[in-house]
Image (spheres, rainbow, N blue to C red):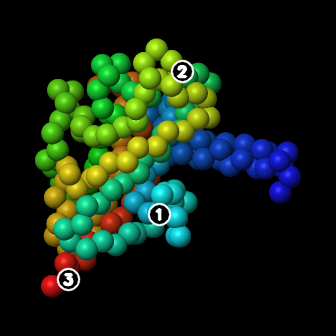
Amino acid sequence: MKPKHRLFFLTIVFSIICVGSAFSQQANGAKPPFTLEITANVEKGHSERWDFVNTSQSSVKAGSTIVVRIRKTNCSDHELSKSPADGGPQPWLFTVRDSQGTILKSTAPRAPHGWIIGGGPGLLRGTKDMFLQPEEAITDSVPITNGYDMSKPGTYTIQAIQHTSNDPASPLVRSNIIRIRVLPASK
């Protein structure tokens, strides 16, 4: 594919992702400034690349650490902060349900504002590195089993959620829902 065609193709794909995700994530009819996507799958043959296209069910053995990857894409026309104003961890909230649809309570340590304390990218304060530019995406890995007991065999669903600002009353943006099948541990 020629570079000119590749750029056009990527622009179309980005537009579809932002607009399509925005329709499913609208809060009170307003278009959110970003979209969220979640996956637990890596690309086949590439253990370091996460597969955000094929987010179908993943299977793991009971007792395994389950890591999810979240991609936040700026769909606005202005830059967004990559981290909360207080310099704390990424404000990921999760809805994790077991096979019966029961929402699991988090056992993760939480910051005072209720966000799960997790990793996040290293950012250089006072630089553009602190901001997500329009059409730019950032990804973050979260070991979800550090905050939720998914040790029993069954199928679990996970959805990432984030407020549109640091205000806890601000609208929420929700990711797609992924399924993780936990198989019995081998003896």
Give the quadrant of the N terminus.
bottom right
Q: Secondary structure at mark 2?
A: helix
* Image position, residue 93 (x, y; %): 29, 41
Q: Residue at x 28, y 52 (%)?
A: 143
- Between circles 3 and 1, the one closer to the viewer is 1
Q: Amino acid at mark 1?
A: Ser
Residue underneath mark 3:
186
Q: CA distance from mark 3 to mark 1?
A: 23 Å
Q: Earlier in the sequence, mark 2 or mark 1?
A: 1
CA separation in Å, label 2 and label 1 = 30 Å
Residue 109, quarter of picture = top left
Please tell me whether residue 75 is drawn above or below residue 143 in the rendered image: above
Number of residues whose C-alpha sits closer than 10 Å to that of mark 1, classed few (under 14), some (14–19) or many (20 or more): few
Q: Residues within 10 Å of mark 3 (few under 14, many from 20)?
A: few
User: Tag 3, which secondary structure?
Assistant: loop
Q: Quadrant of the C terminus?
A: bottom left
Q: Which mark is residue 128?
A: 2
Q: Quadrant of residue 78?
A: top right
